[in-house]
Image (cartoon, grey):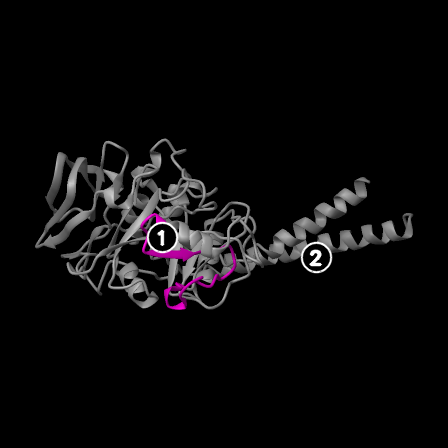
Amino acid sequence: MARVVMTLLGVITIVLCFFSISPIYKWGEPRPFEGDKIYNPYSGSDSTTVWKRATFHTHTKVDKGINECPYYPDVVYDEYKALGYDIVAFTNHNALTVHPTDETLDLHGYEHGYNLFKLHNNIFGTDKVQKYDILIPLFDSHKQFKMNLAGKDGEITVLNHPDRTLGITTRTMERLSGYQLIEGDSGFGERDSGEGTHLKRWDEALSAGHYSHNILSDDNHNPKNPARIARRSTWINTPSAQYNDVKEALLSGNFYSMRTPPGIPTDSLPRVAEIALRGDTIILALTSPAQSIEIISQNGEVKGKVSDSSRAQYIMQPQEPYIRLTARYQEGTVIYTNAFARYSQGESPYNGATPEINWLMTILYNLLLLIIVILLSIRVLKSLKFVAGGKTK
């Protein structure tokens, strides 16, 4: 029996080694945003365009693949539409899901990852699914390689729920690059006791010079559960719900995100009435007074706060790498803007360059995996011969 168990463990280890193949990267030091220009994610906002409520992370029942929801896409879509949503993106694990009513509304997305650490990425704008994943992504190089691999066939990459992914640390957020969007607040329901509203992981990335936009969605697995649906949403300024329009708004950051308590109708929610950059002054106007509006900068530091007001403005100082705003309401609704950030070259502070590969460490690491596989394979084959022969040779 012991030999059988050891053989099984050997096979499992061989599989894990195969699904651990990865380059090893050279990591640079954090470099906060700087420059004489300020990126305004809302520069393309159109006042004649209605802000559309969206979810970009929800699951459905699928005929082939991993099922994490008991309902098919048409049911999920109808539930969200009934709650006032204009855009519903289906992101099933390692499976593309066709839009149930109109193929022009399909965002061509899926959630990549079936690893044990729940290190996942949503990929949009793709027609193929990346099958390879690192089952135990222990190292930051694993995490970077996995994201690069999944994102190479898509147009938009999302870093999913880093605040509840095993193995994500401050150092990880200072290193990872290549994603345009991040789920900054992604707990299920209110089980995070409000901690998610601080957007800690997003601030860690922004403070290290990795620019991305904060996107919120339910990560819903049961649309019939009122505690889990319409809790986190994204309000996007786009003329239509078709992919090309949505893609443009997502990549530019022309949206804001919102966390809400359960049961609040869409028509009763506060909205952003105006968000703009005039010179160095950031302006935010809301449709109803917030309990507080926080001005947040480097390392998540609150630089200022306005209480009991529907309006805030802040002059961004030359030494401040970025500014974002958070509006909090007494009943629990929270509104987050995207970040205004400094830069000097190009069209934005976003830099999706992949870290340089350390070829020596890559060769040594993967060679070690190969040696482990060979030694274990020899041992497994000997064990199988023993079991088949019924005695030691």
Mark 1 or mark 2, which is nearer the start of the sequence?
A: 1
Where 273 falls versus 48 (above or below)?
Answer: above
The range drawn in magenta is 82-107
Q: Is residue 102 magenta?
A: yes
Question: Tag 2, which secondary structure?
Answer: helix
Q: Nearer the viewer, residue 283 or 225?
A: 225
Looking at numbered disc 1 in the image, what kind of residue is underneath it?
Lys
Q: Is residue 210 visible?
A: no
Magenta stretch prevailing secondary structure: loop
Residue 374 is tagged as 2
Label 1: few (<14), some or many (≥20) within 10 Å? some
Q: Where residue 120 appears, x then y in whole percent?
A: 46, 51
Q: Where residue 288 appears, x then y in whole percent?
A: 16, 40
Residue 316 falls left or right of residue 113: left
Q: Residue furthest left?
A: 279
* Label 1 sits on residue: 81
Q: How many marks?
A: 2
Residue 90 is tagged as none
Question: Tag 1, which secondary structure?
Answer: helix
